[in-house]
Amino acid sequence: MGLLMAAAVPAQAEPVTVQFVDWKLNDSQAILNFYSSVAAEFEAANPDIRIELVPVQWEQRVQKFTTEVQAGLPRDAIRLSKDDLVSLHPLLEPLGPLLVEAGITGLVEAMPQSIVRDSLTFDGELYGLVHNVSADGLMYNKRMFEEAGLDPDKPPRTWEEFRAYAERLNKPPQQYAYGMFGAKSASSARRWLRVFWDAGCEFIARDFTRATFLDKPECIAAFTREINFATVDKFTPPGAASADFEFVITAFAQRRVAMHAGGSNNAAIADSRNPGILGELALAPMPETGAALVNGDVMAIPKGAKHPVEAMRWLAFLNSKDMQVRSALVLNATPARADAIADERIQADPMLAFSPPPEALFAGYSTPKWPEVQEVLFDMVQAALLEEQTPEEALRDGAKRIDAILAD
Amino acid sequence: MNRYATVGYAFIAPSVVLIALTLMYPMLEGLNISLFEMGIDFQRRFVGLDNYREVLTNPAFWSTVWRTLYFSLVSGVASLALGLGLALLLDMQGLWFRAFWRVLFIVPWTISHVAAGLSWKWIFDSLYGVANDTLMRVGLIAEPIVWLGTRDWAMFAVIVANVWRSYPFVMLLLLAALQTIPRDQYESAAVDGSSPWQRFVYVTLPHLRFAIFVATAMDFIFNVRQFDLIYVMTRGGPRDSTEMMSTLVNRQAFEFFDYGVAAATSMAMLVMLVVATLAYRRLMRSASEVL
């Protein structure tokens, strides 16, 4: 009798648990608390879904992700860097059918379409939702400008002006004008690509067939100018070939470096290294064109995820206008959605509202061979910074190697 | 098979199974993958020995092999010298605060490679590092050295960090061996008028022969496999100046997603380690016959 009664009462379905892997959860307690409260809000609105936040180290995110997918144990949702998608999209679920199944509309249309088209779509399928964006500008210390007799509200707009400013700011070994990123890292790569774009050059052809940075003399001149800032003008701290993000941001936070190419979140990171410095910092478009790579965080669903539709609902929640604004304020990153950028909470912060001219923004190169090409870019930069080759020799040598990689 | 042998096999069976699962399976799977072209989508296409041909005909691979050997040998010799010296110190009769020194000298071994790498990266920082500050204060250098941003200094820096991390292992093994040497042998040698150096060469060293072999062979293997410390400190740079086989494999597998080539490089690394260990064993045997 008891068994019959139990069968007659519909059993309450157990909530589905969506595992969300995110390196940002490791960045600070404030970020972890924020996403915990966001997950609680989502669960209250969606009682059939539980969110499990899974922190991962930034350095291990790709290795863990690929290993989990290969082992047949993928999580349900993941934060990746936009640049990760070039290599990793074969291990992700296409989002189009999931958006339809989850009944979500209007979300993709609210994202920046150039990023959706150039960086998130492969073979006609969408693989990620962009959560926030960042594009480098000239980040500088206004106090150091003032101390050098420069107007802090008039950052350099041409490379001639930049050089003149740098000469005033450069007081080695205590203070250097410019922080240059020469170590091997994705953050270095995007800053060096900027050098070519600013000169009106593509680094590789858009059909990914060959290196194109030797096509115009302006490209060689721009690369040489940037290298010379370190090797001839000595505007950078010694050892630019090993200068990574930590090195530059720490030197900048400690007022040992006056300027560097950085995104809006760099100011908050500098402030975490040297509390109180935030008020001294400003961000302007880089000299000449303001050319920059649009980078950002992307939310995606691993191939073979157990609960892809529920994960899609969670990602749609995270990428609603209000959530993008709120997370931008916590992460110190510019939201991706145009309506979120226009929000008064974002516009109230000049760092978060910063954006280079739209025509100066580049999406990067979406070829699976990019990691190998990027390795050659690092080698060219370091060969020139170590003065083992002239900038032009490094470029010519690099072009041959890149052509061979792309032809393979 | 007699009853005792059966019981013996039964006792070691769990360990054999465990080792087979955790060591042999990955090794065989690595060998298997090395025969395929395998990218990020994990689709396998059999290519026979093509990956090995690609690896072994690449000049960058061979320069990485020599660099790895240089790093491993220099680190190994320095660790042996430091480990042996400190083991002899800790074994000295009448050493004050022996327990304190013993704990102090072991501390580097207890610290993770990543934490050690980050610490050494800051120690060798060209703007803020303790290394430059100390050397400048004592007047040994006039200008800061760019430790991690130049070829030679970068290799020196990773070797120093690696020796600091690895000498306690050598020291512990040698200290354990030193404590097994009968004291009466030293006393007899002293009565015969031998000098401390002669006692070290003719009494201590022969007793340490096996321990030195084990310590240096294992230290060499650890050095060849060293990854975290180097990756954290230099990522193999600047250029390829600190690129080792381990960082090369990591790059091939997790940056280029060329798993087949990465597996072939790993297999080449394994063969090198086995050959080097066998050669070293033979060398030690010859040396012991001379002694």
Image (tube, coloured by chain):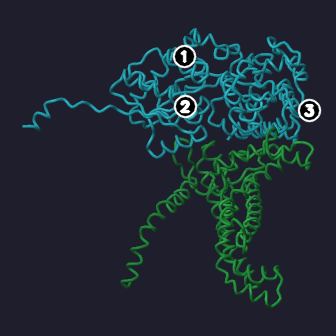
Chain colours: A cyan, B green
The label nearer to you, 1 versus 3, is 1
- The disc at residue A29 is 2
Q: What residue is shown with label 3?
A: A232
- x and y percentages locating residue A92 in the rendered image: 49, 34
Pick whichever, A336 or B36, lies toward us: A336
* Chain to which the residue tagged by mark 3 belongs: A
Residue depicted at x 45% and y 21%: A317
Relative placement, left or right, of A194 versus A77 is: right
Numbered disc 2: secondary structure: helix
Q: What residue is shown with label 1?
A: A325
Discs 3 and 2 share one subunit: yes
Label 1 CA crowd tier, 10 Å (few <14, some 14–19, many 20+): many
- x and y percentages locating residue B68 in the rendered image: 73, 57
Question: What is the spatial separation of the Cα atoms under label 3 and label 2, in whole angstroms?
Answer: 43 Å
Please identify the quadrant where the C terminus of chain A is shown: top right
Q: In terms of image quadrants, where is residue A394?
A: top right
Q: Tell me whether circle 1 and circle 3 mark residues in contact (CB < 8 Å).
A: no
Residue depicted at x 81% and y 11%: A154
Question: Mark 1 or 3 closer to N-term?
Answer: 3
Question: What is the spatial separation of the Cα atoms under label 2 and label 1, in whole angstroms?
Answer: 19 Å
* Chain to which the residue tagged by mark 2 belongs: A
